């Protein structure tokens, strides 16, 4: 597995951030401009943003992943640059009709911007994820094709050698019968360095051509077939390597798009409820106080935190009760407690739920049940965490030394690690679901050697793990 490409110099990032700092909110059809809604940064705020934002700050805020700097384009949702009203602003605006009208317009613009950013970035992420999935599958197909051709070439090369040796033994017998001991020594079985060497000698032997033309012709045919398959394997490997580079680039682009979509969703989660409550407070003509609306926002936030905590606790409970995650002496672990439902390699395509399964399975399916824990098979670094077309929610881990693993069909909200995170063998990284092209909750687990998929069953068995 190739590691992510080196990051460009800071000038490109700084230029992107300067562009970001001066952006207005996203302008949708019928949306307010930055000037109309009053939600663009002031000159002072833009200056402070340019001076104070660092890559570390953005990473800490969850707004920018390291992979984002690898791909050109907007790095963050437009609303990131917006300023949001405080409850003190809302309270002050209620005392003046003109100020209140302006604040209402501003908040509506911010709500529209947040909603638009989520829709836009989600669409972009889905498109990028689809492109990544397609490129990845094309690369996997090419990898298997190259390996198959090389195996066939190796078999045919051995056939050529065997055929040449057979012809050599016949030639030796012919000349033994004729008493030519010099020729006997020359054509003794196995004396030639290669099949080509032996066949070139046999080609000048009149007696062989006269009496054993068929044997000689078969040896030549086997040699030519071996060379043809070898040439095809070379072409297939070149195409495999090209498609690998395409797949890696698509993976980077998809990760960036996923990060942007998550940043937009985080911004919406952080601000939308409060903005809607502030808008209602401004438009409310009853005696309900600002404090009541503010308390409602806080109650909703606490309820969401409790829901997420309960969800994570349930995942950890399921993980603790399962049989996955136990690390063996090799440093590897079973990726889930589930039993095997589908193996690696060619299979009959099955259709259902509006799609059909592939006719070649690049991983192994393990089913522990919806919400069952998914564990890192070994220590490594998360190089992808996001949606991936037919794989649904997907995590890819680089273990170093050209070794990697992939985990697909993770349930919505079932990511427990993120891009760039370091994990240990047996760490809980997600939970089983049926996102993407899945016929039920399961983990589709893959193992990679130098980027190409290999049979996970034998791969883990060699490391002392049974699946």
Image: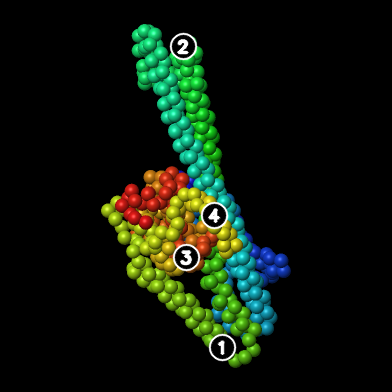
Please tell me which of labels 3 and 1 falls first in the chain.
1
Q: Which mark is residue 231?
A: none
Q: Which mark is residue 441?
A: 3
- Contact (Cβ within 8 Å) of mark 2 with mark 4: no
Comparing labels 3 and 1, the label whose residue is closer to the camera: 3
Please tell me which of labels 2 and 3 falls first in the chain.
2
Measure the alpha-carbon separation of dots 2 and 3.
Answer: 70 Å
Secondary structure of the residue carrying tag 4 is loop
Residue behind mark 1: 289
Q: Is residue 58 visible?
A: no
Secondary structure of the residue carrying tag 2 is helix
Q: Which quarter of the picture shows residue 428?
A: bottom left
Measure the alpha-carbon separation of dots 4 and 1.
Answer: 62 Å
Measure the alpha-carbon separation of dots 3 and 4.
Answer: 18 Å
Q: Which mark is residue 207?
A: 2
Residue most toward the left? 329
Comparing labels 2 and 1, the label whose residue is closer to the camera: 2
Comparing labels 4 and 1, the label whose residue is closer to the camera: 4
Residue most toward the bottom? 287
Q: Left or right: where does residue 206 sit relative to residue 84?
A: left
Comparing labels 3 and 4, the label whose residue is closer to the camera: 4
Mark 2 surroundings within 10 Å by alpha-carbon count, few (fewer than 14), some (14 through 19), many (20 or more):
few
Residue at image coords 64%, 84%:
283
Residue 295: x %, y % from top left: 51, 84
């Amino acid at each position: 597995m190739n590691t992510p490409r080196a990051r460009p110099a800071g000038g490109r990032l700084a230029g992107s951030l300067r562009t970001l700092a001066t952006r207005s909110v996203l302008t949708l059809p019928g949306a307010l401009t930055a000037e109309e809604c009053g939600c663009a940064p002031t000159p002072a705020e833009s200056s402070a943003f340019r001076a104070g934002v660092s890559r570390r700050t953005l990473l800490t805020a969850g707004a920018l992943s390291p992979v984002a700097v690898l791909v050109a384009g907007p790095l963050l949702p437009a609303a990131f640059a917006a300023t949001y009203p405080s409850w003190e602003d809302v309270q002050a605006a209620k005392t003046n009709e003109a100020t209140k009208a302006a604040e209402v317009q501003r908040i509506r613009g911010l709500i529209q911007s947040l909603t638009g950013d989520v829709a836009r970035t989600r669409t972009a992420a889905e498109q990028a994820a689809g492109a990544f999935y397609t490129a990845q599958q094309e690369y996997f197909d090419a990898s298997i094709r190259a390996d198959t051709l090389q195996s066939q070439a190796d078999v045919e090369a051995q056939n050529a050698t065997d055929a040449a040796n057979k012809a050599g033994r016949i030639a030796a017998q012919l000349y033994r019968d004729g008493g030519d001991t010099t020729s006997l020594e020359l054509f003794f079985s196995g004396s030639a360095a290669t099949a080509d060497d032996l066949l070139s000698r046999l080609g000048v032997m009149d007696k062989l051509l006269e009496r054993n033309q068929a044997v000689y012709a078969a040896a030549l045919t086997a040699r030519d077939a071996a060379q043809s398959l070898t040439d095809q394997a070379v072409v297939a490997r070149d195409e495999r390597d090209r498609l690998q580079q395409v797949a890696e680039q698509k993976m980077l682009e998809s990760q960036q798009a996923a990060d942007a979509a998550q940043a937009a969703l985080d911004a919406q989660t952080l601000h939308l409820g409060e903005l809607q409550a502030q808008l209602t407070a401004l438009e409310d003509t009853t005696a309900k106080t600002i404090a009541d609306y503010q308390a409602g926002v806080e109650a909703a936030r606490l309820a969401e935190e409790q829901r997420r905590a309960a969800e994570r606790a349930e995942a950890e409970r399921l993980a603790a009760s399962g049989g996955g995650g136990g690390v063996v002496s090799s440093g590897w672990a079973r990726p889930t407690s589930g039993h095997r439902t589908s193996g690696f390699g060619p299979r009959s395509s099955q259709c259902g739920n509006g799609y059909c399964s592939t006719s070649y399975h690049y991983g192994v399916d393990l089913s522990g049940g919806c919400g069952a824990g998914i564990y890192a098979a070994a220590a490594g670094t998360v190089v992808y965490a996001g949606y991936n077309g037919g794989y649904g929610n997907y995590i890819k881990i680089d273990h170093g030394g050209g070794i990697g693993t992939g985990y697909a069909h993770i349930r919505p909200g079932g990511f427990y690690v993120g891009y760039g995170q370091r994990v240990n063998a047996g760490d809980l990284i997600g939970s089983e679901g049926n996102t993407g092209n899945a016929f039920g909750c399961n983990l589709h687990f893959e193992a990679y050697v130098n980027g190409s998929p290999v049979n996970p069953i034998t791969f883990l068995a060699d490391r002392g793990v049974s699946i």
